Image (spheres, rainbow, N blue to C red):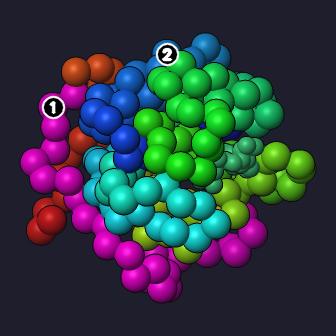
Amino acid sequence: METVFIGFGSNLGDRVDYCDRAVTLLSLLPHSRLRGVSLLYETEPVRDRTDPGEGWFLNGVVQLETDIKARSLLTTLQEIERALGRDDDDRSGPRTIDLDILFYGDCVIKEPGLTIPHPRLHQRRFVLMPVNELDPLWVHPVFKRSVAQLLTEVSDESHAHLLFPQPSTRYGSRPNCQVPPGS
Ligand code: ADP
Ligand code: MG
């Protein structure tokens, strides 16, 4: 079994519902066990190579243990994105749900269409914060730095804060769902 971190984000429609459905589907994957689900973070849309529109994102991270190989996991995530209504014709536009493999154990993969660790995760506060919540000592296998260290070094100026109040989930479970003190 490998430990994997999957980032989810939604900035279109009923964002909480899309996130909850994605978490539920991930929790039901075969040959896999849900280890943790972060709180939800609300984040400003980042305009780098894409134009996700004006809507703020809800973002979070799921931690799984799985026997599903990285490539199959990517295919499965794309099926879940499609099932939840993501528009394949405008992939860089506003999205009902975006699912990214952030870490797959300590594997480093660079293939057409699949880069692990996710190539931009260390630049994104809204990804590092929820991974830090789940496992601050997790080490990035390329940079050899823990997620907590990467978070102190990130220069991302975009706004990311915990969604408050956190919604009660209608689907699945949030085993790690405890608001950290002082937040
Ligand atoms: P982004 O998530 O960067 O906003 P997309 O969700 O449209 O953009 O993904 C674009 C492509 O990124 C996908 O077609 C997929 O093949 C590729 N990709 C490469 N590495 C990963 C990864 N680790 N997780 C998810 N998708 C990835
Ligand atoms: Mg994606």
Residue type highlighted by circle 1 = Ser
Residue 60 appears left or right of 28 = left
At horizontal 70% and vertical 57% (from top left) the residue drawn is 117
Q: Is residue 130 visible?
A: no
The location of residue 22, given as percent across then percent down, is: 44, 28
The location of residue 153, given as percent across then percent down, is: 49, 85
The residue range painted magenta reads: 141-169
Residue 168 is labelled as 1
Q: Is residue 142 visible?
A: yes
Q: CA distance from mark 1 to mark 2?
A: 19 Å
At horizontal 82% and vertical 46% (from top left) the residue drawn is 113
Q: Is residue 13 above or below residue 161?
A: above
Q: Is residue 59 above or below residue 35?
A: below
Residue 156 is labelled as none
Looking at this rendering, what residue extends furthest in the right direction?
111
Q: Which residue is mark 2?
A: 28
At horizontal 37% and vertical 30% (from top left) the residue drawn is 18
